């Protein structure tokens, strides 16, 4: 039986021209050989399977060739080239640093470097996976690497350049190998298929190239695997079946479901994918890539970024025209968030399903996708109830005909409001207002906009200005004026929001926040409350805070007439917080039985 050689070895490049996807590096090496400007140490770094060791061997063979060709390639006819091709050359030494990484191995290599070549000009030492050398081995190699003999050239190859000591990097010319593009990989696979007499669909080779992720060796290995599975006739369907790859068709269908807001169909498709053994993370990553491909398909300028076959490319262009750009932006953001949170999620399937629901609702009727803002992750009802089953809604309040503000105010003050008059849904009434509205004990008191309360120190003529404003507004058309309403509040409400404000104060004002928490406000009338302090310094601080406190309390209490006053306590008036003993003494004054209880059980206050 004839010995079988895998494609990765059988079709390994033997010249610079046959190296795939590294045109810039091979041109640089050929020019260096042609001009005779050879460095004593090179470092080839890059991902796996992109041609680092292959280029090192071609470079070693070419610099020892006795009669190179005009384009800078090895002749393959001289004794040096024949010895290299037959793997009997004494000028080229390969060392696997993964298994020879000790100081003794490097010392043995240094001893060999001293011996000049028997045939050719140079002795080339290729050290593969050089990052595996120990720190002691690197240090033992430094001096020889910096000043080797004239006939010695070192080529270091690694996939992890960051693990190499900076002292080694500074002594080498560094060549960074890039990943091989999908088009170059597909072209090389098609060349190998033609040489082997294998028929292959371009879409199938494209899937193999995408699976290889820029590594030619991986692509050829997958190619051999698929050939064994299909028997020499490679089709798109056989490739996705053998490699367990999600078909493009799934993502095209899913995107159509998104655009039509078919949430149920999207969830059923996800269930089908999971039942076939695919991981949810793999599915959501593929969906992100699909949305990205749709995005680059919308603009002819970015179309070269689409790395798919010709027939699939046309489908992408057709579907991309159906997708609004804001939808693609927001869908990609949601999928990316799902990918980031997938590993930490306890219920991974639910996370993916929620993401699909949110994406499907992006183009729902009435949803604004015209902006490019980050999507709001809000779930809407998936299933709508029949119209007959829905609860009847209260009819909206009908506006009154034209009238002045003064007339409306007097009418609303004298006429009780009906039970179906409801406040605006955006308004959050105070706790007392809610209770009063439910019990129907009191009615909301509408007031005129911009009305003042009492006389201000800074505006002594506020009452005259108020009358002037009312007269001016009354003359305007009534349909442009909508009176606002103020809510009734009590002392408990004002103290509740006072404590709330104190709790939200920054850490820099912790002292005054603590003082506010120990205060108890007193209502002087329906809208004016009093703050009692014990000295002038604190009074100045609270006076300076009046504008901010009034604005906050007016907003929270839904009353624009809330007014704050500050008063310094009398010498006999106690305004500081009571201690435990003082509280007990006050309670005893109201109920003497507490003192008897304390004495009977021998209780003490702490």
Image (cartoon, grey):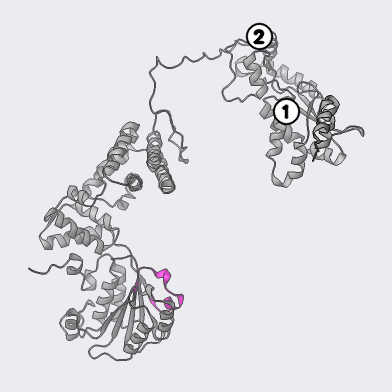
Which of marks 1 and 2 precedes in the sequence? 2
Give the quadrant of the N terminus.
bottom left
Q: Is residue 470 left or right of residue 217?
A: right
Q: Looking at the picture, how far across and down is residue 570, in whole percent?
A: 91, 32
Q: Residue at x 38, y 73 (%)?
A: 131
Residue under pointer 2 = 416
Q: Residues within 10 Å of mark 1 (few under 14, many from 20)?
A: many
Q: Residue at x 20, y 85 (%)?
A: 80
Question: Is residue 56 located in the magenta-colored stretch of the structure?
Answer: no
Are the residues at dot 2 and dot 1 in contact (C-beta closer than 8 Å)? no
Q: Position of residue 352 (x, y in %)?
A: 38, 41
Judge whether 193 appears above or below 553 on screen.
below
Horizontal relation, residue 483 to residue 566: left or right:
left
Identify the element where label 2 is drawn. Answer: loop
Q: Is residue 477 visible?
A: no
- Element class at badge 1: helix
Determine whether 291 is above or below 77 in the image: above
Tell me residue 404's x, y (percent): 67, 13
The residue wearing badge 1 is 494
Is residue 449 visible in the rendered image? The answer is: yes
Q: Which residues are magenta?
A: 157-173
């Amino acid at each position: 039986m004839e010995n079988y050689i895998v494609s990765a070895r059988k079709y390994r490049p033997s010249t610079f021209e046959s190296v795939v996807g590294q045109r810039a590096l091979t041109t640089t090496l050929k020019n260096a050989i042609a001009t005779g400007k050879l460095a004593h140490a090179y470092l080839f770094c890059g991902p796996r399977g992109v041609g680092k060791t292959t280029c090192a061997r071609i470079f070693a063979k070419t610099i020892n060739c006795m009669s190179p060709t005009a384009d800078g390639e090895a002749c393959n006819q001289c004794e040096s080239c024949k010895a290299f091709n037959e793997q009997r050359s004494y000028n080229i030494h390969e060392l696997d640093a993964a298994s020879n990484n000790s100081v003794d191995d490097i010392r043995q290599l240094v001893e060999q470097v001293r011996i000049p070549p028997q045939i050719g000009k140079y002795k080339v030492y290729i050290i593969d996976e050089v990052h595996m050398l120990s720190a002691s081995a690197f240090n033992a190699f430094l001096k020889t690497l910096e000043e080797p003999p004239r006939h010695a050239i070192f080529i270091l190859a690694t996939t992890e350049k960051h693990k190499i000591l900076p002292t080694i990097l500074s002594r080498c010319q560094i060549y960074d190998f890039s990943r091989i593009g999908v088009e170059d990989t597909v072209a090389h696979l098609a060349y190998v298929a033609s040489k082997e007499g294998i028929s292959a669909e371009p879409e199938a080779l494209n899937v193999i190239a995408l699976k290889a992720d820029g590594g030619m060796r991986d692509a050829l290995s997958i190619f051999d695997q698929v050939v064994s599975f299909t028997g020499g006739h490679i089709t798109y369907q056989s490739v996705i079946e053998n490699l367990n790859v999600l078909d493009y068709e799934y993502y095209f269908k899913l995107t159509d479901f998104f655009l039509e807001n078919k949430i149920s169909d999207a969830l059923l498709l996800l269930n089908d994918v999971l039942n076939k053994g695919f991981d949810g993370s793999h599915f959501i990553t593929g969906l992100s890539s699909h949305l990205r491909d749709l995005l680059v398909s919308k603009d002819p300028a970015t179309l070269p970024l689409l790395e798919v076959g010709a027939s699939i490319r046309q489908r992408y262009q057709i579907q991309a025209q159906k997708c609004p750009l804001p939808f693609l932006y927001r869908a990609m953001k949601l999928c990316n968030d799902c990918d980031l949170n997938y590993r930490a999620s306890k219920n991974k399937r639910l996370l993916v399903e929620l993401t699909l629901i949110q994406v499907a609702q992006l183009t729902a009727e009435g949803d604004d996708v015209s902006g490019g803002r980050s999507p709001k992750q809000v779930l809407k009802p998936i299933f709508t109830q029949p119209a007959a089953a829905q609860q009847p809604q209260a009819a909206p309040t009908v506006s009154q005909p034209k009238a002045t503000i003064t007339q409306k105010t007097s009418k609303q003050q004298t006429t009780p409001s009906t039970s179906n008059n409801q406040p605006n849904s955006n308004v959050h009434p105070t706790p007392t207002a809610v209770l009063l509205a439910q019990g129907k004990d009191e009615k909301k008191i509408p007031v005129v906009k911009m009305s003042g309360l009492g006389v201000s120190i800074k505006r002594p003529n506020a009452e005259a200005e108020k009358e002037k404003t009312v007269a001016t507004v009354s003359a305007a058309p009534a349909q442009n004026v909508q009176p606002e309403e103020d809510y009734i509040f009590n002392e408990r409400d004002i103290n509740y929001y006072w404590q709330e404000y104190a709790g939200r104060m920054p850490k820099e004002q912790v002292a005054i926040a603590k003082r506010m928490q120990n205060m108890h406000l007193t209502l002087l009338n329906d809208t004016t409350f009093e703050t009692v302090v014990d000295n002038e310094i604190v009074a100045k601080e609270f006076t300076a805070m009046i504008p901010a406190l009034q604005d906050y309390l007016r907003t929270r209490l839904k009353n624009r007439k809330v007014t704050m006053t500050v008063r310094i306590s009398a010498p006999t008036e106690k305004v500081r917080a009571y201690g435990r003993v003082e509280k007990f003494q006050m309670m005893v004054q109201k109920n003497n039985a507490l003192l008897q209880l304390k004495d009977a059980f021998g209780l003490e206050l702490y």
